[in-house]
Amino acid sequence: MFSILHLEKSELIKQMVKDSLMSKEVKYIPVDSVDMARPFIFSKKLDLIVTSMIGDLKEIEVFIKEINTGINKDTPIFIVTSNDMDDSVKSILNLGVSDYIHKNSLVTEISKHIDVLFHQNNLLNSLREMSIAVIDDSILDQAVVKDLLSKIGVTQIESYKSGHELFSSGKQYDLYFVDAVLKQEYGKSLIMQIRRNNLNSTIIIISSLNNSKTVAGLLEAGANDFISKPIDENIFIAKLKANMRIKV
């Protein structure tokens, strides 16, 4: 069940949101103030945080910064206001807010977001059923990818230090994470061979290379996407979901 924390003073608006979520598997948590919201953001993993511009701008800024340093640092935050976009709203958005919603469209936007969460959950369920190979000559980098995948419940992962080791296994996988530069191999030829053997697989390059021509060449060789090292967790998960949307 998904959990939504909604910071709002208006009882009418809270009731409207609550009514709109009645048919969905959602736990709706309405609060009247930042002080009432704090126990939830520090003790419970939430799926969405919605806050109107309660109190002064500084209080909202502090509240968002607190969210971004705790267990809900990756939770989407929606700011709700009755005003048009101005400098104060822009400054808050830059703190890590996911979306800015006008009060008139609040109910619709929350409902849409919940539908997206359900869809993403289905994507993750599909991902958990996939076989995954990590080809990287760094044990540390292999561990980083495995750790990120384990956070979303993905465990069917096998690691290889080289393309030769991968192909010697005779195994094929649904998803490949490939380091572009291995000790005695360049990722481009490895990607081309994986693609020849498995047209329907998803191949994601993970590399510290950043030259645009080099990256373009790797993508043209058959890779679906590129993630830079050191790996940013948010980008990693977002790109994984994006590729699953295409596949599922």
Image (cartoon, rainbow, N blue to C red):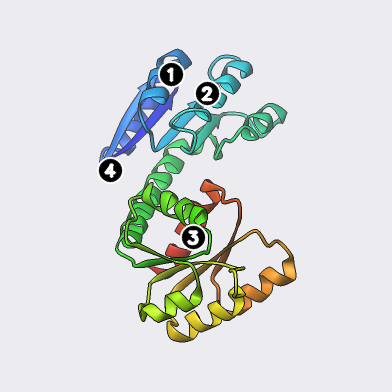
- Mark 4 → mark 3, Cα distance in angstroms: 24 Å
Depth check: 76 or 82 in front? 76
Percent from the top left, x then y, of residue 198? 42, 82
Percent from the top left, x then y, of residue 20? 33, 38
**Comparing labels 4 and 1, the label whose residue is closer to the camera:** 1
Using the image, tell me which numbered label, if any, was put on residue 38.
1
Looking at the picture, does residue 181 appear above or below residue 128? below
Around disc 1, counting alpha carbons within 10 Å, would you say few (fewer than 14), some (14 to 19), or many (20 or more)? some
Give amino acid for label 3.
Ala
Pointer 4 or 3: first along the chain: 4
**Comparing labels 2 and 4, the label whose residue is closer to the camera:** 2
Looking at the picture, does residue 211 appear above or below residue 103? below
Label 2 secondary element? helix
Q: Label 4, on which residue?
A: 24
Q: Label 2, on which residue?
A: 66
Q: Label 3, on which residue?
A: 242
